[in-house]
Amino acid sequence: MAKVIVVGLGPAGPELITGAVRDAIQRTRRRFVRTRRHPAAAAVNPAESFDAVYDQASSFEEVYRAIADRLVFEAQVGDGDVLYAVPGSPLVAERTVELLRSMPAAGLEVLGGLSFADLVWDRLGVDPLAAGVRLVDGRNFATDAAGERGPLLVAQCDAAHVLSDIKLAALDSLDRAGAGEDPPPVVVLQRLGLADERIFEVPWADLDHAVAPDHLTSLYVAELGAPISREVARFADLAAELRRRCPWDREQTHQSLRPHLLEETYEVLEALDAVDPETMSGYGDLEEELGDLLYQIVFHSVLAAEAGQFTLADVAQGIHDKLKSRHPHVFGPADSRSVESPDADQAVVNWEAIKRDQKGRSSVMDGIPPGLPALLLADKVIHKARSVGVVPDFDAATVAGRLFDVVLAAQAAGLDAESELRVLADAVGGQIRAAEIS
């Protein structure tokens, strides 16, 4: 059977076509180009284009599958190899090549070409490996760039609606991340390698108004906000370095860090109490205290990694997978159990049922720390009772019963008994100090 030879036409004019590709064009008689809307497409003539498929199909995926099917068919029934020319490099962002590789009936040869990305790195002076650039499809920006903070090279920005979707997805991501400052402008790159090449910056808000896109338009996004993954990685590396080089850090064990973890936890609680959402005060202290608490978590992960047990990445992956599995009403059913969660109480019931199955526990009471203070223990037990539909039965006339009833009443009012009692105790403490001064 004949084979399909896929060749890259480079990012611009025919002068950037490689010698190997020119040789392949010369030795084949049956030629196809994905589109004639490319400056080097004429170098393949005579050739049949798939531009008509673009006009008839309802989606790009349908276009690409139709092209792959046609090429395999031609290779099976015709005489001689089939040449298929694509813009840029067939090894970069070329869906039809992915499909051809997945089709066992297709004999395939791929000849690389200069990619548009190669010209981008040259024009911007960027080393993509050192900078950690990720290539994403502009038509799927909302999903491909989800959670990314940059740098990103965005390809396939060939229509105004694509630019509009990219802008809305980026600004929405920044809003959800709580970015307080305007992000750096986006770099627009058009027709690289041609006489009318353009490279310019534009604010995100003006992206879909200030740019006239074409099929040779791409974007470079240096940063979309706080680079979360990079900062966490730097922090984890620092904790590991301190463990190696600081005498105090070297002496610590899981047990010796216990009081520090407890202290930092209480300091976070104190900072939480000082936050005022109306005046937006207290967030600076909360940020600092959360950092101190995070250091304890990272430190314990470093110690566990030394013991060959787990790493910070394992901790993050574990909590990610656990939360996802316990929210089937958000991410889809994990089993045959009904996953409807019309309200928060039903979500808690689902959570406890899934947790019991995953842990192999016979009771929701399993796993409650036995050393909890009595007030916190009562609060936890009441939550567990609600999750399985149990109404607590106790003697409200006793002192213990009255205390338990207070915790029930606090929960019914949407309050945390521990916090409320602490606030009152602090207030009485202030009265004591005032009395001592007078």
Image (tube, rainbow, N blue to C red):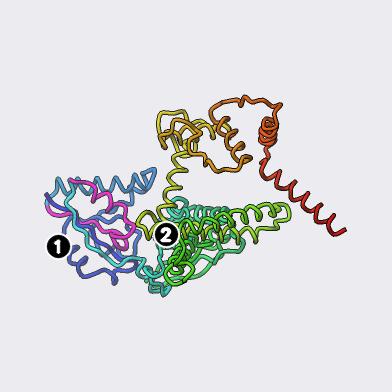
User: Looking at the image, which residue is at 44% across and 40% down?
Assistant: 325
Residue 171 image-quadrant placement: bottom right
Report the residue at 57% width, 30% height from top. Answer: 385
> Where residue 165 sits in the image (x, y, percent)?
50, 52
The amino acid type found where label 1 is placed reads Arg
Q: Indicate yes or no whether the magenta region holds residue 289.
A: no
Q: Left or right: 132 with respect to 376?
A: left
The residue range painted magenta reads 80-104
Residue 54: percent from the left, percent from the top?
36, 49
90 in magenta: yes
Tell which of 323 and 211 is nearer to you.
Answer: 323
Q: Answer whether labels 1 and 2 touch (C-beta < 8 Å).
A: no
| Foreground: disc 1 or disc 2 | 2
Residue, far right: 438
Mark 1 to mark 2 CA distance (whole Å)? 63 Å
Local crowd size for mark 2, using a 10 Å CA cut-off: few (<14), some (14–19), many (≥20): some
Q: Nearer the N terminus, badge 1 or badge 2? A: 1
Residue type highlighted by circle 2? Leu
Question: Which structural element holds mark 2?
Answer: helix
Residue 87 occupies which quadrant of the picture? bottom left
**Residue that appears at 65% across and 56% down:** 271
Observer-nearest of 285 and 39: 285
* Residue 62 image offset from top left, x and y in percent: 34, 44
Residue 143: in sight, yes or no? yes
**Residue hosting label 1:** 27
Please give the residue where the numbered disc 2 appears in the rendered image: 303
Residue 189 sits in quarter: bottom left
Above/below status of 434 relative to 425 = below
Is residue 194 among what the camera can see? no
Q: Is residue 179 left or right of residue 351?
A: right
